[in-house]
Image (cartoon, rainbow, N blue to C red):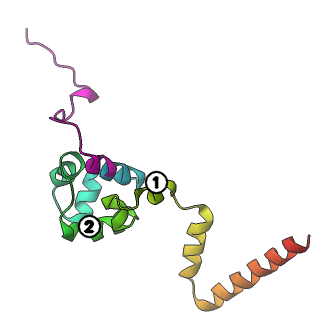
């Protein structure tokens, strides 16, 4: 009789040989905060997934040609990826609903933007009087 091997989630992949670098941990946090998998990042940057894994576990930095596209993909600045001015970056959470709405308004044609601006002005004025 052959032994039965039960596969579970703890058997997936290899265990890391060493602890991740501080840069790698930070990069992984940014990726997860953006809601992306390593594979999604790899496909967007057109690099192998194993490279993304390497950057998150062993690397101390990124190749310069990946910095800007990765920052755009994650929705953060290159400085934030590199950990520059980290105190300022760590205080910032995800964009609020209102911020996302204002970004969408900026994409509208000028007349619609002016209409929304006028409407907001009237609402704010009414609230100041009340």
Outermost residue, right side:
130
Q: Tell me which label, 2 or 1, sits earlier in the chain.
A: 2
Residue 104, given in percent of the width and then of the height, sits at: 55, 75
Find disc 1 in the rendering and name its residue: 90
Residue 103 sits in which quadrant?
bottom right
Residue drawn at (85%, 71%) of the image: 127
Main secondary structure of the magenta stretch: loop
Span colored in magenta = 1-26
- At 63% from the left and 66% from the top, the residue drawn is 98
User: Which image quarter holds the N terminus?
Assistant: top left
Q: Which residue is mark 2?
A: 67
Q: Is residue 39 visible?
A: yes
**Pick the front one: 60 or 93:** 60
Q: Is residue 3 left or right of residue 114?
A: left
**Within 10 Å of the Cα at label 2, are there few (<14), some (14-19), or many (20+) other Cα atoms?**
some
* Residue 59, image x, y percentages: 18, 51
Q: Is residue 94 left or right of residue 125?
A: left
In the foreground, 129 or 38? 129
Residue at x 30% of width, y 60% of height: 82
Tell me the SS state at disc 1: helix
Callout in the foreground (2, 1): 1
Q: Position of residue 41 (x, y in %)?
A: 28, 58
Q: Is residue 39 magenta?
A: no
Question: How many numbered tags mark residues here?
Answer: 2
Q: Residues within 10 Å of mark 1 (few under 14, many from 20)?
A: few
The mark found on residue 11 in the picture is none
Question: Looking at the image, which is closer to me, 107 or 15?
Answer: 15
Q: Secondary structure at mark 2?
A: helix
């Amino acid at each position: 009789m052959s032994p039965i091997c039960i596969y579970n989630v703890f058997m997936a992949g290899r265990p890391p040989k060493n602890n991740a670098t501080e840069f790698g941990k930070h990069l992984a946090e940014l990726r997860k905060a953006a809601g992306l998998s390593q594979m999604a990042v790899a496909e967007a940057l057109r690099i192998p997934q194993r490279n993304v894994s390497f950057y998150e576990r062993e690397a101390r930095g990124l190749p310069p040609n990946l910095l800007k596209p990765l920052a755009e993909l994650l929705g953060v600045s290159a400085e934030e990826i590199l950990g520059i001015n980290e105190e300022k970056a760590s205080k910032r959470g995800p964009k609020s609903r209102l911020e996302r709405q204002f970004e969408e308004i900026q994409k509208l044609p000028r007349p619609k933007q002016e209409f929304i601006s006028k409407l907001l002005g009237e609402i704010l004025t009414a609230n100041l009087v009340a």
